[in-house]
């Protein structure tokens, strides 16, 4: 294998971004980070080119990605790139955070890009309207194709400075991380729940079980919001703001794809819900 792309996703944007890159790169494979972090052993990628693809959370990295990056042994890696997907801002601050963690392990990012995708932070806002989503995904597809060309020739494209967002990140992010384990106490489930088990299966960190037919969260939440967005009957809410807001999943990413992330299987592109 020439290129190995590690991904973490809640609602499919980052998985799709990883797939888009893999389409353009020779002999590329995708691998989910979550099961590797669960195993807890050091990770030595068996590819000369390695990529990391994940969402931006609070102008920084998901906690799981921080742990993943700290577990990497990059001794055999020639070229390392990262793609962060975001609703609007903080991508460069997240890339710089990743670069900082990796550099403590003796390796720097060779290239990084932040791309805009439909925002999935349902607690704060509704996802964009369908036409806007399609436009964003199309534009980002083009940006990823261009980035893949740079990766192919191992061009250096290191993340630039992000003074303002890195400053705001430094203020906001520690509170987000500290609140994570218990943040799932804010999830509630209504009588609409059909005990279908989807929330259990899409949670990348196996944080949900069904107790008496209803989801129960076990306080190792990553706040990826996969459960709330994937529930087919919108029975899950978080706090007081999510009721009545549209749910989101990348149109080309299926529930089996999200299950595959949890199980550690390579995501087989299934029948897409749209041609995007
Ligand atoms: C907890 C949380 C925090 C987020 N924080 C940011 C943020 O700081 N900036 C931003 O642009 N998008 C933010 N988002 C939106 C996601 O980064 C964006 O929708 C991403 O593409 C989701 O990727 P995924 O579908 O692979 O999970 C946040 C989403 C979540 C769930």
Image (cartoon, rainbow, N blue to C red):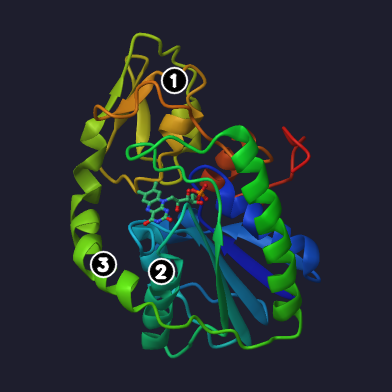
How many numbered tags mark residues here? Answer: 3
Mark 2 vs mark 3, CA separation in Å = 12 Å
Position of 32 with respect to 57 (left or right) is right
Q: Is residue 253 visible?
A: no
The location of residue 219, given as percent across then percent down, is 25, 41
Q: Which one is in front, 129 or 222? A: 129
Mark 1 vs mark 2, CA separation in Å = 30 Å
The location of residue 274, given as percent across then percent down, is 74, 35
The location of residue 118, given as percent across then percent down, is 53, 45
Q: Decide: marks 3, 1 in contact (CB < 8 A)?
A: no
Question: Residue at horizontal 60%, vertical 41%?
Answer: 132
| Labels 3 and 1: the sequence-earlier one | 3
Q: Is residue 263 above or below residue 101?
A: above
Mark linked to residue 168:
3
Label 2, secondary structure: give it.
Answer: helix
Tell me the crowding category of disc 2: few under 14, some 14 to 19, or many 20 or more residues within 10 angstroms, Cα based: many
Q: Nearer the viewer, mark 2 or mark 3?
A: 3
Mark linked to residue 234:
1
Q: Which residue is mark 2?
A: 94
Position of 197 with respect to 141 (left or right) is left
* Some atom of ligand 1 lies within 8 Å of the CB belonging to the residue at label 2: yes
Position of 261 with respect to 272 (left or right) is left
Mark 3 vs mark 1, CA separation in Å = 33 Å
Tell me the crowding category of disc 3: few under 14, some 14 to 19, or many 20 or more residues within 10 angstroms, Cα based: some
Q: Is residue 225 above or below residue 241?
A: below
Where on the picture, by quarter, is residue 270?
A: top right
């Amino acid at each position: 294998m020439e290129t190995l792309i590690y991904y973490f996703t809640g609602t499919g944007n980052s998985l799709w971004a990883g797939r888009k890159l893999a389409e353009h790169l020779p002999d590329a494979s995708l691998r989910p980070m979550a099961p590797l972090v669960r195993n807890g052993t050091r990770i030595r990628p068996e590819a000369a080119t390695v990529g990391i693809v994940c969402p931006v959370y609070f102008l920084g990295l998901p906690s799981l990605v921080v742990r993943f990056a700290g577990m990497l042994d990059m001794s055999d890696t020639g070229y390392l790139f990262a793609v962060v997907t975001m609703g609007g801002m903080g991508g460069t601050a997240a890339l710089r955070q990743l670069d900082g963690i990796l550099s403590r392990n003796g390796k720097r990012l060779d290239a990084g890009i932040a791309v805009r995708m439909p925002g999935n932070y349902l607690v704060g806002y509704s996802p964009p309207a369908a036409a806007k989503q399609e436009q964003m995904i199309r534009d980002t597809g083009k940006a990823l194709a261009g980035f893949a060309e740079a990766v192919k020739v191992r061009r250096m494209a290191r993340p630039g400075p992000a003074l303002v967002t890195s400053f705001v990140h430094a203020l906001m992010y520690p509170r987000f991380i500290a609140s994570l384990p218990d943040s799932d106490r804010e999830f509630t489930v209504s009588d609409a729940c059909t005990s279908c088990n989807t929330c259990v299966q899409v949670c990348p960190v196996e944080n949900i079980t069904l107790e008496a037919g209803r989801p129960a969260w076990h306080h190792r939440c990553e706040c990826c919001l996969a459960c709330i967005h994937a529930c087919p009957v919108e029975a899950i809410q978080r706090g007081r703001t999510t009721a009545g807001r549209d749910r989101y999943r990348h149109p080309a990413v299926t529930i089996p794809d999200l299950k595959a992330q949890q199980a550690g299987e390579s995501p087989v592109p299934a029948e897409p819900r749209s041609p995007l």
